[in-house]
Amino acid sequence: MLGLDQFIAELNKSISMFLPETALVIAFLVALLLDLMFKKSKNLTGYTALIGFLVTGYFLFKQMNMQSTAFSNMFVIDQFGIFMKWVILLSSIGVVLISFFTNELYEKAKGVGEYFTLIIGMAFGMFLLVGSSNLIIIYLAIETMSLSSYVLAGYTKEVKRASEASLKYVIFGAVSSGIMIYGISILFGLTGSLNLFEINRFLAANPVNNFALFLSVIMILSGFGYKISAVPFHFWTPDVYEGAPVPITAYLSVASKAAGFAILLRFFKVTFLDSVPGNDSVWTLLGSIDWHFVIAILAVLSMTLGNLVALWQTNVKRILAYSSIAHAGYMLMAVSTMDDAGVASVLIYFFMYMVMNLGAFYVVALIANNIGSEEIDDYNGLGYRAPILGICMTLFLISLTGLPPTAGFIGKLYVFSAVVKAGYIWLAVVGVINSVISLFYYVKIFRNMYLNDVDSNKSKLTYSPASIVLLFVFAIPTLYLGIFFNDIVKWASYSANIFMGK
Amino acid sequence: MDLVGLAFYFLAALIVISAAIVVFSKNIMYSAFSLMFTFFGVAGLYVLLNADFLAVTQIMVYIGGILVLIIFGVMLTTRITGVDVKSNSLGKIQVGIAGLLSTIIAISLIVVFSSTKWFLSEPKVSGDSTKLIGNELLTNYLLAFEAASVLLLIAIIGAAFIARRK
Amino acid sequence: MQESVPLNYYLILSAIFFVMGAVGVLTRRNAIIIFMSIEMMLNAVNLTFVSFSSYNSDPAGQMFVFFVMAVAAAEAAIGLAIVLALYRNQQTVYVDKVNLMKW
């Protein structure tokens, strides 16, 4: 145990590195108190959340070049974490703004005070997960994210779909985290420590029973796989995405997945990389289990199942749910290469995925505001009843398929090139085939909007000018980043270096 | 066989039999009460393993908190005065598949556990378990402690919101 | 005190306990019994941690159990609140009767 003075000095240093998360906690508490004091004001907690996120962004910006551990090696700050935290923060701001324009929340729920408070809480959990380096913090952060998302998914209590979705989510999430901590306990028994850096040092020096190690990591992967909706841990995704309110579905599909991928990458690199100095760009794995192959199998299953099942769905939110399972598959392909180019391509893909997925869900929300439905047959003729929405939705669909000149194409380009460079040509071929399959169901939405019901005389949709401004906030980067993508690529390559401890 | 071994076998039998009743009984109230015996059995094992603070915490949190909450849930959602305290299981095929899968998993886990060489070191610290846990909570595990408090606050807000009647 | 019962016995007991909890989750249809089985699974994990911790005299395992208990309580609270909300909505707690969303 440290001496008291030394301990206090280290604590001060740790707190100064924890400022963004502290800002989130303070915003959470302020939002809670304001909601209790001023019950009349409708969106007060929403504005508090926005201010809190902006302050967090300021602290995050000041951390841009740090790289160290904090809180007795439980928390780690490095460029990789900061990139992911920016993705999570930007998507949190986006989701709060989308929620302001979603009528479903204001009509069917009993007030939105707790809603924005819980979004801040979920953001805190995600920030904690991205920076964690100890298995206890990983577990606590995953549970913080999960608990707040169980409540947020069932927020519109009176809608039957929402409470059913929430129940399935709770059961599945609790079982997955139970399996995950069983795996953690076996890993603890094998290596004697809960800290990722110490586990690495132990595995590098001593041989362990390979079957036990394999079993424990598979069980831990079930917890991470549930967060990123990889097959075969994806069963909750379609029902929860369909039943939850649209902004929450958007949040789960982008930010929650980002945090899950961040911890997946960090866990694999820090635990299993052989820390040979000077050889950082290619990871040599400890133990004799071929993790490349295991993750590649997960990637193929996710891509294929996501794309094939989406073909016969009729609810637009469910189509987007299965498409997000497929996108997780593409990103898992890049993770399976397990080198720095792969990590950089995952970061690039996430940034592009954020703008296009949030935009697509925002259009679904605006359409549901007007016609009250999310079924694909009710989208007939929408291209003519709401021209701006139709054009933007087409742009997002082109980007999700991965065609140039949109952001989605850049993301897929870098992922495929990282996979090919690592030598897994068969995996890239499977990815390309799956992208072609995905074209079919994205085109179905486009076809219903523009080529069905052309001459109907139904009324035009109404939407406020402010909501269209927000729509352009998502649509313009989707196009812009498809053409001027160099800055993001440079930032991602710089951030691909995951901190390995001293 | 000495007293500790005897206590272990008794508590192990208590846990396994109560767990079987929880999972296979058709009456919810029987399941809830045998869950209580399961928790007591685990608390007894903690005492055998030198974790006295955790044993008492187990009784207070699990039995005094979670089990009471579960019984509240049972009472609020079942028509006690009617017939429906019973609950059914799935059809025979699904039970069969689940049983087969779990037997395979159980056997593989048991094989792993019997043959692995676990990490064993000299005792790091010795002493009173409560004092040790308290010290660790506020020095090395400070971040986890604070994060857990935020988590509990989120749970309170969420549960209060969802369970509210109107 | 630990020499008379080998570590493996505790681990095998917790494995059996975990699998019985998993069987409960897979085969029962009443949501509250599913929650009880989940609590059993978490208890099995706690037992594993405490056994490792006591055979090494390393407090890290006991710390993890402390946090798992806190999280389990929070999860039980939210889970049962959601079951209650579902019961008010649809008058049933059987997970196969709530199936508005198909494949």
Image (cartoon, coloured by chain):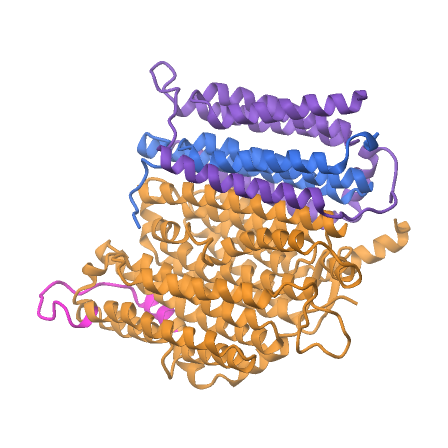
Residue B5 versus residue A369 in the image, above or below: above
Which chain is displayed in purple in the rendered image? Answer: B
Compare residues A474 and C44 and report the one nearer the observer: C44
Question: Does residue B64 appear in this view?
Answer: no
Residue C84 versus residue B30 in the image, above or below: below
Residue A260 part of the magenta-drawn span? no
Residue A397 placement, left or right of B27 = left
Residue A408 placement, left or right of A373 = right
Compare residues A276 and A47 and report the one nearer the observer: A276
Q: Position of residue A415 (x, y in %)?
A: 49, 76
Question: In the rendered structure, which segment of residues is drawn in magenta?
Answer: A449-472
Q: Position of residue B140 (x, y in %)?
A: 78, 49
Compare residues C101 and A184 and report the one nearer the observer: A184
Outermost residue toward the top in this view: B81
In the figure, the shade used to draw chain A is: orange
Q: Position of residue C100 (x, y in %)?
A: 29, 43
Identify the residue at image location x=65%, y=53%: A211
Residue B57 versus residue A267 in the image, above or below: above
The number of numbered discs placed on residues in the rendered structure image is 0
Residue A355 versus residue C56 in the image, above or below: below
Residue B138 placement, left or right of A440 = right
Which chain is displayed in blue in the rendered image? Answer: C
Residue A467 part of the magenta-drawn span? yes
Q: Quadrant of the C terminus of chain A?
A: bottom right
Compare residues A499 and A179 and report the one nearer the observer: A179
Residue A240 placement, left or right of A258 = left
Identify the residue at image location x=81%, y=42%: C56
Q: Position of residue B9 (x, y in %)?
A: 70, 24
